[in-house]
Amino acid sequence: MVRKFTLTVSACVFAAFSAFAQKSPADYVNPFVGTTNYGTTNPGAITPNGLMSVTPFNVMGSDLNNKDKDKSWWSTPYEFNNKFLTGFAHVNLSGVGCPELSSLLLMPTTGKLDVDYHNYGSLYRDEIATPGFYQTILGKYNIKCELTATPRTSMARFTFPKGQNNILLNLGEGLTNETGASVKFVNDREIEGSKLLGTFCYSTQSVFPIYFVMRVNKLSEKSGYWKKMRPMEAEAEWDETAGKYKLYTSYRKNMSGDDIGVWFSFNSDKEEVVEVSMGVSFVSIENARLNLDKEQPFGTTLDKLRQQARDRWNEDLSKIKIEGGTEEQKGVFYTALYHTLIHPNILQDVSGQYPQMEGNNILTTNRDRYTVFSLWDTYRNVHQLITLIYPKRQLDMVHTMLGMYREHGWFPKWELFGRETLTMEGDPAIPVIVDTWMKGLKDFDIKEAYKGMYKSATTPGKDNLLRPDNDEYMKRGYVPMESQYDNSVSHALEYYVADNALSTLADKLGKKEDAKLFRKRALGYKNYYSKEFGTLRPITKDGKFYSPFNPKEGENFQPCPGFHEGSSWNYTFYVPHDIEGLIKLMGGGKNFVDRLQSVFDNGHYEPTNEPDIAYPYLFSRVKGEEWRTQKMVKKLLAENFTTKPDGIPGNDDTGTMSTWAIFSMMGFYPDCPGVPEYTLTTPAFDRITIELDPKYWGKDKLVLVKEGNGDYIKSIKFDGKTVNKFRISHEELIKANVITFVTTNNINK
């Protein structure tokens, strides 16, 4: 009896171990991470860099019995603490700070047809989310909802209870600031139409239509349109039908308006499954239909699409294999990599067609065309990661930027579905393109790229889309304040980083005078340095430092003279291309380190925004102080990144914060945009195997090994040979086969 029990336990242990051993990277991903604490991610279904995403929408509607609902709305279709759902939104943004997209709201209901979202919304329970799949149960209706996606389409499977069941497509609501839609029945199971989207961050330039085709796999007993009634313009007050919804049961021609929708009703005497497929395009209805036909051919099932999406995710996530570390750390790592691979998104249809950048023409490409370039964020680390791990994708993104320059005359700043939103500062495409080329990915026209970059760097401000204050910048070497909250210092700091990258490229291309000019400009940050405060400080139009000045002003994202979304402390060390010069300004290495340490000790560091995210790595620029980087990176990872819904410290910014965690956990970080170098730190895992593409890197893998369980680095070996530095070039990284970090618990000064 005892022996039998022992064998049973052993068998169970072996089974558990086998299950653990077979755990794939996708199993570690928790799509709910970042869905609260203003992370603005969502748990919806999407494929890597896919155009289509479909996610629960819980930021609108009302439920009088749920006083806590919708308490955390902010620029996202989904907030973890909200529990009142009004539909499933198609095509969404992840981790952004402004509301946009998240329209085409699909909602199943039961009982008497009601098309007012205030009424038909429902609480929900039993959520499940994995890469490429989402599931929940609507409590009000007891409907099981399952969602999955392909690159350009989605499929929803609704399991209805007995009785009257309804499927609604609301074309009036969503996160977009634009209104207006058009829809018509193609037949009893298919509808087609378009919806106007745009004005991201309230930009009047970023307006564009999304086209869709939706199919229901079951013939409904009744169907039609709805439209919210409006008063006549001549009437002073609303009539008795104002604010009510009119149902159209037999009309089948086009329906257009701001608050319109389509409904299908079914009756069933038993539990019934209905599937709804959606194809989208930013070119035409015909292309939306073609996308749907190609990616969901006849006989396709949700289970098959779900598996395809999961396989895509596992293929991409498996490019980095990690060993050792805790289960929590693995969850943080692979969830971060998952978030990084959501944006940018492909834009072209299966036909290769896509909308011209800031134009009305339809163009065709034979390679992936991308969109959603949140470059003020992603130029700092996301594109460096894509370059290393997914080089073909990065080249396609650079080709996309070049295409935008050809079509529009400018490289993108914050591009959204073929429209420039002009959000945030700087000239961020320059460091991305330069970094890509400097690392050896040169399969694009660098002369044409240089021409476009030179244009934005030298065109006068009144004619310069990317640098509107370029006149003063070129003349003075800095941007003076025009008004109290004009973000002048932030503008200039971004230009300095871009001009340093451009200087490096100019030198490589043999343009020596250009290289000198742009390098001189890149050092203009010194004009802002105030010895009185030991920080950067705005300068007024008369050339004097702004006064009264408080370097703490602007913390917690409050308005601040000279700085955008941060204080002077968040920006003072953001001159990554000339830390040596900043050290001299501050009076030497000790003063520099003390001042940098004070940023962390006094609570000035802001882990939720980009300007200072590389600060922990700057300690390593001073010999003997590298241990501070190793200590601080580990501390910040533990404090700010978890596998819980609030496991990202703030806006993920289309993967930028997640990418900080990825690099930091692997043990190297690209702390100067446009410069192909990395600063080393202690890896979080015992062994990291990065799969490389031999076509681009001449080898198939790079292995990083951590020896010992210490927090600090005792020595670093490249293929067994000790190196005495903590900053390496991209070429050195790629040439190494095995990089070994020998660790200790003693601070290695």
Image: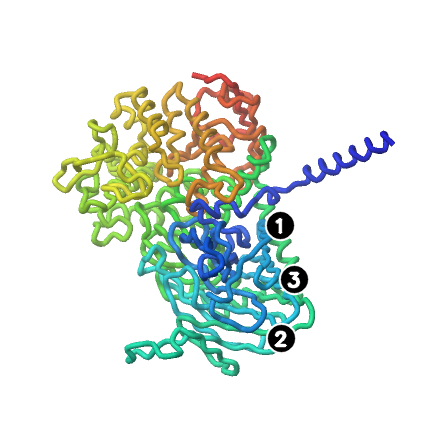
Drawn side of residue 597 relative to residue 168, left or right: left
489 on left or right of 719 = left
**Identity of the residue furthest to the left in this view:** 542
Q: Which residue is mark 3?
A: 301
Q: For mark 1, does the 10 Å Cα neighbourhood hold few (<14), some (14 to 19), or many (20 or more) residues?
A: some
Residue 420 x/y as whole percent: 34, 56
Question: For residue 159, which quarter of the picture?
Answer: bottom right
Between tags 3 and 1, which lies in front?
Answer: 3
Q: Are marks 1 and 2 in contact (CB under 8 Å)?
A: no
Residue at the spot x=20%, y=34% of the render? 527
> For the residue labelled by badge 2, is the local secondary structure a helix, a strand or a loop?
loop
Image location of residue 204, percent across then percent down: 31, 60
**Amino acid type indicated by mark 3:** Thr
Considering only vertical position in the picture, is 284 above or below 129?
A: below
What residue did someone put label 1 on? 311
The one nearer the camera, 420 or 178, is: 178
Residue beneath the point at 48% across and 65% down = 104
Q: Amino acid at mark 2?
A: Leu
| Mark 2 lies on residue | 219
Mark 3 lies on a secondary structure that is loop
Q: CA distance from mark 3 to mark 1?
A: 15 Å
Q: Residue furthest bottom?
A: 250
Of the residues under marks 3 and 1, which one precedes in the sequence?
3
The amino acid pointed to by label 1 is Asp
